[in-house]
Structure formats: C-alpha cells, structure tokens
Amino acid sequence: MNGQEAPVKVGETYEVEIKSVGEKGDGIARVSGFVLFVPNVKKGDYVKIKVTKVLPKVGFAEVVEKAERPVRESKYATVTQEEMQQPTESEQAYEDTEDFGEN
C-alpha cells in the first residue's frame, strides 16, 4: 500500500464477497483495495467478517456470519409490453397536417 496506513483496523466488521481462494485455501476479500485473508469460505460467498490482524500489506479476518448478497438495481430499465404499446409524449404532441406553420 506504498507506506500508507491500512484502510482497516483490528475489530472492524465488513460485509464482503470472497473473490478468490489463496494457495493455502483461505478466501481472499478486498476492502478499499486492501487484501484480507478469510478462512473457511469459498469463492463467491458473501459474508460479514471481523478483522483479527492487520499487517502492512495484508490482513486477516474471521467470518462473523453469512450475509445476504445486496440486491443490485439493473442499469437497464424494464419496460412492460403495455408500456411499449402506449404512444410517447412526442408522438402525442404532433398532429399530421399539411399546414407547414401557415395561418
């Protein structure tokens, strides 16, 4: 972390996703880019952890409880078939005439 202080402290809790598993079988999570090793988890788990030890470049944590994965809103709008059939404001605002703005 380039000589900076670790972004976590012993005793703090976080909800994290285990992104991968290390060589010794511990799960790897990140908090603000800081690596935390968590035993007894597998890749893809979403857990609440408590930091138990912080070293200059990595930390260690234990599972406090299994957590619910947060529901993420889709970045795409969902439109029903009925909404697709309704005319839009721009379609309603114009009348098809041959007037061309003449009075």
Image (tube, grey):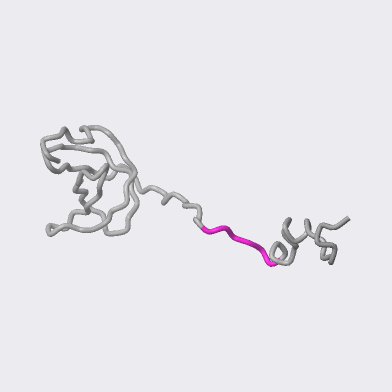
Comparing 21 with 99, the one in front is: 99
Q: Position of residue 95 (x, y in %)?
A: 82, 61
The residue depicted at 78 percent of the width and 56 percent of the height is: 93
| Quadrant of residue 24 within the rendered picture | bottom left
Q: Which quarter of the rendering shows the N terminus?
A: top left
Q: Is residue 40 magenta?
A: no
Q: Position of residue 102 (x, y in %)?
A: 85, 58
Q: Position of residue 96 (x, y in %)?
A: 82, 65
Q: Residue furthest right?
A: 103
| Quadrant of residue 89 within the rendered picture | bottom right
Q: Which quarter of the rendering shows the C terminus?
A: bottom right
Q: Position of residue 70 (x, y in %)?
A: 44, 49
Vertical comparison of 79 with 37: above or below: below
The residue depicted at 50 percent of the width and 52 percent of the height is: 73
The residue depicted at 63 percent of the width and 61 percent of the height is: 79
Comparing 74 with 88, the one in front is: 88
Q: Is residue 78 magenta?
A: yes
| Quadrant of residue 9 within the rendered picture | top left
Dominant SS type (magenta): loop
Q: Which residues are magenta?
A: 76-81
Q: Is residue 39 left or right of residue 68?
A: left
Vertical comparison of 97 with 64: above or below: below
Q: Is residue 48 left or right of residue 87?
A: left
The residue depicted at 15 percent of the width and 37 percent of the height is: 54
Q: Residue furthest front?
A: 102
